Image: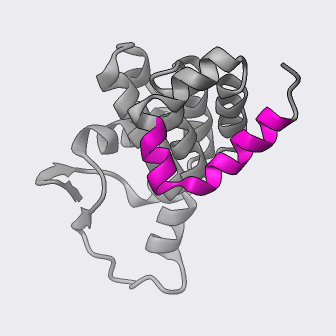
């Protein structure tokens, strides 16, 4: 049983271990206690994303990502990408990356770029950079967003990729 922000979820450790290298190490690795706790507290996740991740582990689908094209769905996709990276769920990470690629616009690109960098998604990161430097107008609009200011303050190293890409373009 997993406890996520007070909500409980039952799951089979063998199924989880078969799909996730982190669960495999936690439940069956050398460092695991052979009397694994029957109730595990999960930190750094919300119940909705843990539920979506469990659904993916059991069914290899993520219908939660297709329900809405609003801010809530984008936020869930971002959190699910981070969870997929944390638990080594590469296919879920790819699904989230593709969904986020389709959501790129001036208002979201900086946030998605930072997320791609933090969660080792080089293709998504490259897509974001290409969008940003696509035209001078888009670059200027992105530079004016709060998302860009957050990236500048919290992930300044990703700005080098933008500069390198922009310097390679001819206007």
Q: Measured along the vertical axis of the image, is residue 23 above or below residue 130?
A: below
In front here: 49 or 103?
A: 103
Q: Is residue 152 magenta?
A: yes
Q: Is residue 29 visible?
A: yes
Q: Residue at x 66, y 39 (%)?
A: 125
Q: Position of residue 163 (x, y in %)?
A: 73, 42
Horizontal side of residue 120 vs 66, given as left or right: right
Q: Is residue 61 visible?
A: no
Q: Is residue 10 magenta?
A: no
Q: Position of residue 152 (x, y in %)?
A: 51, 49
Q: Residue at x 53, y 31 (%)?
A: 143
Toward the left, the furthest residue is: 6
Look at the image and give the residue range highlighted in magenta. 148-167
Q: Position of residue 85 (x, y in %)?
A: 54, 52
Horizontal side of residue 157 vs 9, given as left or right: right
**Quadrant where the image shows the C terminus:** top right
* Residue 13, quarter of picture: bottom left
Q: Residue at x 57, y 54 (%)?
A: 156
**Quadrant where the image shows the N terminus:** bottom left
């Amino acid at each position: 049983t997993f406890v996520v922000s007070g909500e409980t979820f039952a799951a089979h450790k063998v199924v989880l271990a078969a799909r996730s290298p982190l669960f495999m190490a936690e439940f069956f690795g050398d460092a695991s206690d052979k009397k694994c706790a029957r109730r595990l507290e999960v930190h750094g996740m919300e119940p909705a994303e843990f539920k979506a991740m469990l659904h993916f582990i059991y069914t290899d689908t993520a219908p939660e990502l297709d329900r809405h094209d609003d801010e809530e769905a984008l936020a869930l996709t971002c959190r699910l990408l981070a969870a997929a990276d944390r638990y080594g769920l590469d296919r879920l990470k790819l699904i989230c990356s593709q969904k986020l690629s389709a959501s790129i616009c001036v208002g979201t690109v900086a946030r998605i770029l930072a997320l791609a960098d933090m969660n080792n998604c080089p293709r998504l990161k490259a897509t974001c950079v290409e969008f940003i430097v696509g035209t001078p107008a888009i670059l200027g609009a992105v530079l004016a967003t709060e998302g860009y200011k957050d990236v500048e303050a919290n992930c300044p190293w990703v700005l080098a990729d933008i500069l390198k890409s922009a310097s390679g373009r001819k206007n």
